[in-house]
Image (cartoon, grey):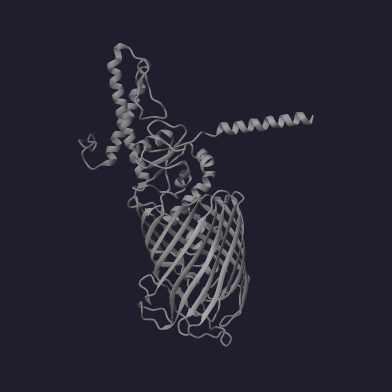
Amino acid sequence: MKSLIFRICTAAILLFSAAQYANAANVVVIANPDVSVSADDVRDIFLGEKQFAGNTKLIVIDNAAVQGSFLSQVLHMDAGKYNGIWTKKSFRDGLTPPAVKSGDAEVIEFIKRTPGSIGYVTSAPSGVKVIQ
Amino acid sequence: MADIFDFGIGRARPRRQAAAVLGASIFGVCMIIAVPASARVIDVPAQTTAAPVQPVAATPNNDAQMQVMQQKLEAIQNELSQMTSGLVNQSGSNAGLPLHGFMDVGYTLNSQGNNVTANPNVPNPRGFYEGRLSFYMAPQFSDRVRALAEPNFEVDQLDGTVGVDIERLQLGYAFSDAATLWAGRFHTPYGYWNTAFHHGAQIQTSIFRPRFLDFEDSGGILPAHTVGLWGTGKVRAGRGKFTYDWYLGNGPRIAGAQPVINPVVNPSDYQTGGLDPNIFGDDNHNALAGFNLGYEFPGMLDGLKLAVHMLNGKVSAYSDFPTTQFSSTWLNTTDLNVGGGSLVYLSNDWEIMSEYYGFNDKNMEDDSKHKSRAGYAQVGVNFDEVTPYIRMERVILDQADNYFSMQANGQSYARQVLGLRYNLSQKACMKFEMMNSNFMQELGRTALSYRSLNVQYAIRF
């Protein structure tokens, strides 16, 4: 009996985990080809700590369609904390929070034609640099 | 009538032009949809609007039509792209000046009614009160040139009149991530609190600042504002970050001080002096200078920051509030020396803040030296939208030190605060705070103890 309960619980946990995994969208951080940053810089860039890559001013773009996945997978925080950080950042340092695009197509199009831009999408297209 | 069909092309009418382009684009899209299914052979990948389109199937009879359609589609894509770009720019830094701010209202009860603080100049009445309305604007003039202004409206605690202050007015230049130089009026970057929360009640966990870190016009004993130059930045050091601030500006003065007080003989005799940041010239031509050096830990200790800070300047006290800058009656001058440190740990669950200030001042008239100290520690725990917190403040000030004896709020005290913050939304919160305050009996001061209950409703926009 104990063995049966254990198996049922294990199966339930596995199913739940699989469902959670299936709901989490894959996130790829991309940038304009002229941007020279590493994966280690991504957190700092999206939290306003790193504003320049060499002499290039970074233009950070949020993707409304996959922001939740990006925040949880890459920055390890929720939208409330992310917005709170940017409120404090702009109030303290006079920085402007990232502009928000509606989805992958807008982000990709913007990044391809804007030097210094960096954002995230669900799959990496050609013509941009994949950071992470 | 001609104007109706004139889309403004060639004129400076961007809105009409954009409307015309949008109309043409929508018309084009409708035409594409209206094309018979046999002719709909263009497959546009959903994620790559700019990618070249490829015909899937075509008959010899409509090849020419297909090419025309492709050209039209590409033209529409370009137009939409340009319009999107325009909208992005409008929502960014080029769309005028976004105005943000904070406001709060509150209610206070205390155990002794009105006029209970150690400084009768700053009464603590019972009842509802109007808090601050603080705006902030951060226009960006280029990639590196930036500005920040924080006009603040607040009610005078003494007479209820509304005063307006430009609490911060900074013009800056960012050389890199490691160096930004600001000029103007800024919050003096000592410790942590003074540059973390400014005048924004909503982003501050508690209702009140630690008493000794209050702003000058609220009875603070440290120069919360400085007019001058401020350099700040962060540099990677290993996996962590080294942070620094340095500043140089007008030293403050103490205005409206009483040269001699004796509340034991006369209970209505009390000190009335207060810090003035000297926003329009330095009275004694002695600059205030200081630095704050810190380290932000990485990895398992992410969120932990340790810092040390020092501050030096000569502060003169005057017996009146001058009508002109240098017309006051000089009383004395103190060589102010402050050193200390701060420990801050901010994580998803915890919010720990503590600061220490050690004073080693010298009265310039007799060269006597005096040591004092002040500090606080605050701990909060985040349970989703609820954050209970506790704070202990302890301030021991030598009354033989002119810097403190000339200030109305230069009295030693201990305070304990127990509070609860509840986030109604990301931009609004309610705070409930119980406070126990004990002011010490010392030279020129009378002892005082009271408890208070405070409620605050604060928002940001």
Q: Quadrant of the N terminus of chain B?
A: top left
Q: Residue A126's spot in the image, x, y percent?
A: 39, 30
Say if residue B436 shows up in the picture: yes
A39 and B81: which is toward the camera: A39
- On the rendered structure, is B334 left or right of A127? right
Please give the name of the residue rendered at 33% of the width and 12% of the height, measured from the top-left corner. B59
Residue furthest to the right: A1
Q: Residue B74's spot in the image, x, y percent?
A: 31, 27
Please give the name of the residue rendered at 48% of the width and 83% of the height, measured from the top-left corner. B367
Residue furthest to the bottom: B265
B237 and B103: which is toward the camera: B237
B81 and B311: which is toward the camera: B311
Q: How many discs appear?
A: 0
Vertical side of B252 occupied by B168: above or below = above
Please give the name of the residue rendered at 47% of the width and 57% of the height, measured from the top-left corner. B243
Q: On the image, which quarter does residue B446 sit in? A: bottom right
B195 and B154: which is toward the camera: B195
Vertical side of B455 occupied by B221: above or below = below
Please give the name of the residue rendered at 43% of the width and 34% of the height, measured from the top-left corner. A104
Q: On the image, which quarter does residue A2 sit in? A: top right
Q: Residue B158's spot in the image, x, y percent?
A: 49, 73
Vertical side of B337 occupied by B100: above or below = above
Residue furthest to the top: B60
- On the rendered structure, is A91 left or right of B70? right
Say if residue B197 shows up in the picture: no
Q: Residue B230's spot in the image, x, y percent?
A: 40, 62
